[in-house]
Image (cartoon, grey):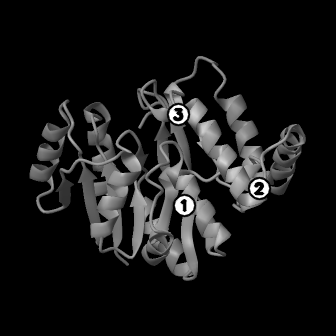
């Protein structure tokens, strides 16, 4: 099975080498790797050139203006020839064995539209923190905050991705979640596979770390709620959100137990911590 991986690399030179190495060092023979640079003004082009020299013929370098991250990804996937699609942000990394595990899962679940695993959080320096444990996904759970899917550990069946029409280019905060929501609303199968596949780096310049699009994100999630429930969120829904979160903790005891363990383990005890 062929995998197409895309990395958006706009002004991310200081992290990009780690992301690219994590893709190109995977022990899977059939990987199509595209790196999208819509016009970086930092050392990003130098990093890509260095990797082209280190891995000749392994990288498709796309230099084209786009309308934002989702648009850049769509343009790359429009050229992709793989059976399975994944994308890795320039500040994140795949863990060893990720692609092999993803292919194995896709082969075990031939009817799935997307498969996804688990992973870890890391800080700006790459120090690993808590595990990120994905959970089962359905639209109602999702809009009430009871479903979690780690994007970095998510892979889409190419035909399912195309059937949805790719990512919503107007969505600047959670285009990956919207794609999964649309797949689920159309009755497509989403499968969670236990396994640590990636590292999600949070730092002051990232969307998650900076919270610079917080208000836009809230509006986007309100739109998701209207799409699924057919109405706006009410005060009662905020109460239900807390109940659903509690229900999801009971429904996913493994994820809950691991989160509790990590909260204890990552307390500042003065112990050395592993880095990527």
Binning the other alpha carbons within 10 Å of mark 3 as few (below 14), some (14 to 19) or many (20 upward) gives: some
| Residue that badge 2 annotates | 141
Binning the other alpha carbons within 10 Å of mark 1 as few (below 14), some (14 to 19) or many (20 upward) gives: some
Q: Is residue 111 left or right of residue 141?
A: left
Q: Is residue 243 visible?
A: yes
With respect to residue 162, does 136 lie above or below?
above
Are dots 3 and 2 in contact, CB under 8 Å?
Answer: no
73 and 247: which is toward the camera: 73
Q: CA distance from mark 3 to mark 1?
A: 19 Å
Q: Is the N terminus in the top left, top right, bottom left or bottom right quadrant?
A: bottom left
Q: Earlier in the sequence, mark 3 or mark 2?
A: 2
Q: Is residue 159 left or right of residue 42?
A: right
Numbered mark located on residue 179 in the image: 1
With respect to residue 202, does 26 lie above or below?
below
Q: CA distance from mark 1 to mark 2?
A: 16 Å
Percent position of residue 19, x then y: 33, 45
Q: Is residue 15 left or right of residue 172?
A: left
Question: Which one is closest to the eye, mark 3 or mark 1?
Answer: 1
Are dots 1 and 2 in contact, CB under 8 Å?
Answer: no
| Residue that badge 3 annotates | 208
Q: CA distance from mark 3 to mark 2?
A: 21 Å
Percent position of residue 27, x then y: 33, 64
Q: Earlier in the sequence, mark 3 or mark 1?
A: 1
Task: Name which residue lies at 48% across and 34% down.
Answer: 207
Secondary structure beneath label 1? helix
Secondary structure beneath label 3? helix
Number of marks present in the image shown: 3
Task: Name which residue lies at 57% across and 51% down.
Answer: 150
Percent position of residue 33, x then y: 27, 60
Q: Is the C terminus in the top left, top right, bottom left or bottom right quadrant?
A: top left
């Amino acid at each position: 099975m062929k995998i197409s991986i895309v990395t958006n690399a706009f002004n991310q030179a200081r992290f990009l080498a780690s992301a690219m190495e994590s893709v190109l060092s995977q022990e899977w023979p059939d990987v199509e790797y595209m790196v999208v640079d819509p016009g970086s003004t930092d050392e990003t082009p130098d990093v890509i050139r260095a990797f082209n020299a280190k891995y000749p013929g392994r990288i498709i370098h796309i230099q084209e203006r786009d309308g934002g991250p989702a648009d850049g990804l769509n343009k790359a996937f429009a050229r992709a020839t793989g059976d399975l699609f994944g994308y890795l942000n320039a500040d994140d990394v795949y863990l060893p064995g990720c692609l092999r595990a993803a292919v194995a899962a896709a082969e075990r679940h031939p009817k799935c539209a997307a498969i996804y695993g688990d992973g870890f959080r890391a800080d700006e320096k790459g120090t690993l923190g808590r595990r990120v444990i994905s959970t089962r996904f359905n639209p109602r759970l999702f809009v009430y905050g009871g479903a979690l899917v780690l994007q970095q550990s998510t892979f889409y069946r190419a035909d399912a991705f195309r059937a949805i029409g790719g990512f919503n280019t107007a969505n600047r905060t959670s285009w990956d979640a919207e794609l999964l929501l649309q797949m689920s609303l159309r009755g497509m199968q989403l499968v969670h596979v236990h396994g640590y596949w990636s590292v999600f780096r949070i730092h002051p310049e990232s969307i998650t770390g900076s919270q610079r699009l917080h208000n836009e994100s809230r509006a986007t999630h309100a739109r998701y709620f209207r799409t699924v429930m057919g109405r706006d969120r009410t005060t009662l829904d905020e109460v239900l959100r807390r109940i659903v979160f509690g229900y999801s903790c009971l429904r996913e005891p493994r994820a809950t137990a691991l989160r509790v363990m990590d909260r204890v383990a990552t307390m500042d005890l003065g112990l050395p911590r592993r880095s990527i």
